[in-house]
Image (cartoon, rainbow, N blue to C red):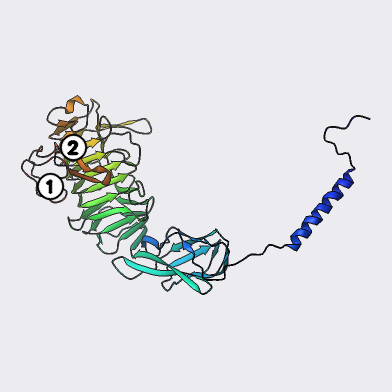
Amino acid sequence: MPPKPPGTMSKPLSVFVSGLLLVGVGIGGLVSCNPFKTEFETGPVELRFSADTVFFDTLLTTVASTTRRLRVYNDQPKSVAIASLGITNSSGAFSIIVNGVEANPLENIELLPGDSLLVLLQANVPEGGQTLPFVVEETLLVTTGANQQTVPVIAWGQDAHFLRDSVLQCNTVWTAGKPYVIYNNVLVDSLCTLTVQPGTRVYSHNGSTVFIKGRLEALGNATAPITFTNDRFDNGFTNAPGQWSGLVFLEGSNNNRMQFTHIRNAENAIWLGTPDNDTLPDLMMENCIIENTSGSGILAFTSDLQLTNTLINNCVDFCFAGLAGGNYQLTHNTFANFGFGFFRAQPAAVFTNNLLLTDGSELQEDLLVRVNNSIIWGNTNDEIQLSSTPNNTFDVVFKNNLLKTTLPELQNKNLINQDPLFMEPESYDYHLDTLSPAINAGLNLGVLIDLDSLLRTNPPDVGAYEWKQN
């Protein structure tokens, strides 16, 4: 008989299995004689909450919010029986979910010692019939025995005009008061004008675009600027680039005007593709602010643009790009790009009389550029790129600017590589510091005020802002 392998049982298998069964019976008897018993706190109980208030930032009415989380902690040595957990909901604005169950209230919840309960809250504020934002406040009630604890639940609501995939009626007027919220796209059709009055707010949902084939007239003022931005207001979205597509001016659009208008958090804030046979401005922009784009601030193709007293900053690609020719008159502007929150590799400004298309062909048109009394600055070695082909005019002149560049053709008649000393660019403050070399470095070109409507001195300061002594 061959030897037994190491570890082989010397007793028959049946005997071994019988022994295990007996042991199992014994253990089962011990358990049945000592059943686990939950002990509950019987006296007054104080539960602990992860926040003393649940707050929802301003919400567009009838649009569901993101979920807020509230944890309820049991710091007691024994379990706690929560008799009821619910929210006063006379407004009908809030809902709660606990352990995957949505109900109001939820009852008979057991919370083990040292454990916590996750409460999910969501808001969907009904219309308030008001122009200004309004507050909705309810209370989360948690009852344990005779004790009741409360947590305020607060949301701000904002009524709005909602537009979805709309072709606007000719000569539409948008007014201040309730904002306009765009889902998907809106179109200003040929031969039609969209007039946007001072103080108007336009909020666009993710991926939404305002197409202009006709004409846009957005004329804000210093005390009531016009705003085009995203429709998310909660934390993390205030300064996040690329939350909507931007304003797209299509071929045939002309005589567009914008002043005291802020465009924020778009992909390309302005996409200007309006080639024609004249040099009249297709778009005139004065005293505007463009910031936080995942693409470019202004992306123009063979178009005519006049830009004055405008700040463009914090763009992943270009602050300004005039491509494939065009006519660009840029006066008293500030293009500043430091890449706060993202990596950037493109210069702040680029001008070309050519453009290589995706099919391999090249678009070439005459280019005329005048840049005066402006600042072009950023955190790369060269913030300006020029590209020309000999087949078309390349007439580019820079005078009395402050530039970050190594291009030899720009060294004369400009301040080169001298830090403009912005106040706090990381906080979007591009006013000039007291020692800025841009102060009094400009040429009087008849621009009477700056981006803040402050009177310019003679000689004026370079850039969109005139230095103001505190």
- Count residues near mark 2 (Cα–Cα under 10 Å), then give few for <14, some for 14-19, many for 20+: many
Name the image quarter holding residue 321.
top left
Q: Quick check: can you spot residue 297?
A: no
Residue drawn where x is 21% and y is 55% of the image: 225
Circle number at residue 321? none
Give the image location of residue 259, x and y in percent: 19, 51
- Answer above or below: position of 466 versus 356: below
Residue nearer the viewer, 170 or 342: 342
- Count residues near mark 1 (Cα–Cα under 10 Å), then give few for <14, some for 14-19, many for 20+: few
Q: Quick check: can you spot residue 348?
A: yes
**What residue is shown with label 1?**
468
Number of disc labels = 2
- Which residue is situated farthest in the left direction here? 458
Residue drawn where x is 21% and y is 51% of the image: 258
**What residue is shown with label 2?**
420
- Answer above or below: position of 26 versus 282: below
Give the image location of residue 114, x and y in percent: 55, 58
Element carrying mark 1:
loop
